[in-house]
Amino acid sequence: MKSITELYRTLLRTYGKQNWWPAETPFEVCVGAILTQNTNWNNVEKAIENLKRENLLTPEKIISCPDEKLQKLIRPAGFFKQKSSYLKNLSKFIVEEGGIENLKTQETGTLRKRLLNIKGVGKETADSILLYALDKPSFVVDTYTKRLFYRLRIVNKENVSYEELKSSVENTFPPEKENLEIYKEFHALIVRHAKERCRKTPICRSCPLEKKCLACATIMKP
Ligand code: SF4
């Protein structure tokens, strides 16, 4: 399969709309984007529940929360010492910028660079915040995207850079407001597909992409 548009349409037809990100507020998206680094979503949910129970899901409250308390609350998400300082760094940035609504008024590329300057915010985290918290058309790439795009030979090498993968989607669907929902859905659909079928050891038999997947015939399947 060579067409990104065809991939998006097939995934949407198969799984339907995913309506991501699972969060009640934009700040909760920001917190989730940090906490989900190197762990699975079930662990993130437990940490977020702890923060909600303590009524801490605002940047001001995260900043003023004692380190030890914050670390204890987010412990289920792992790397809790690192992540608690990352949450504080991001919260300080949001407060200094005058809040989430003010951030939304900034130009996407400039804001992305500024987010990437925050310790603890890498490319995937920055793009998740831009896309799902700030409604900016910035496509999110993850290891699932990398694996799927290579298996479908949308890209020809396994070790394609983050920016190359991001550009491959953004060249197909330009980063404009009209494609915002496509960006949100496409990333969520890739995650769903990778978890349900295109796993490390894929389940190709029931895959809607099987006939067009060049990798399918050559990889081990259960
Ligand atoms: S056919 Fe198999 S390898 Fe190809 S996309 Fe589907 S699950 Fe992944």
Image: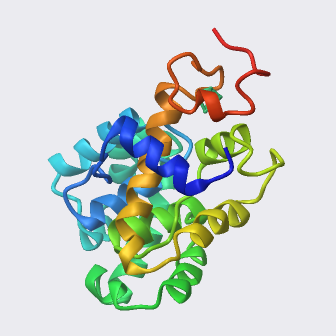
Residue 7 percent coordinates (x, y): 54, 47
Say which residue appears at 74% left-offset and 15% top-offset: 220
- Looking at the image, is 110 positioned above or below residue 142? below
- Is 126 situated left or right of 213 in this image? left
Image quadrant occupied by the C terminus: top right
Q: State whether residue 98 is above or below residue 168.
A: below
Q: In the depicted view, which residue is nearer to us: 127 or 99?
A: 127
Residue 82 visible to an observer of this rendering? no
Q: Residue furthest front?
A: 211
User: Percent from the top left, x then y, of residue 116?
Assistant: 59, 74
**Against 180, is 219 above or below?**
above
Residue 3 in the figure: left or right of residue 92:
right
With 89 as the anchor, is 162 left or right in this view? right
**For residue 192, what is the image quadrant?**
top left
Task: Please determine whether, in this image, residue 38 is positioned above or below residue 58.
Answer: above
Q: Which residue is drawn at the image coordinates 53% and 34% (left, top)?
A: 194
Residue 84 seen in the figure? yes
- Specify the color scheme: rainbow
Question: Where is residue 181, by image quadrant?
Answer: bottom left
**Viewer-proximal residue among 71 and 106:** 106
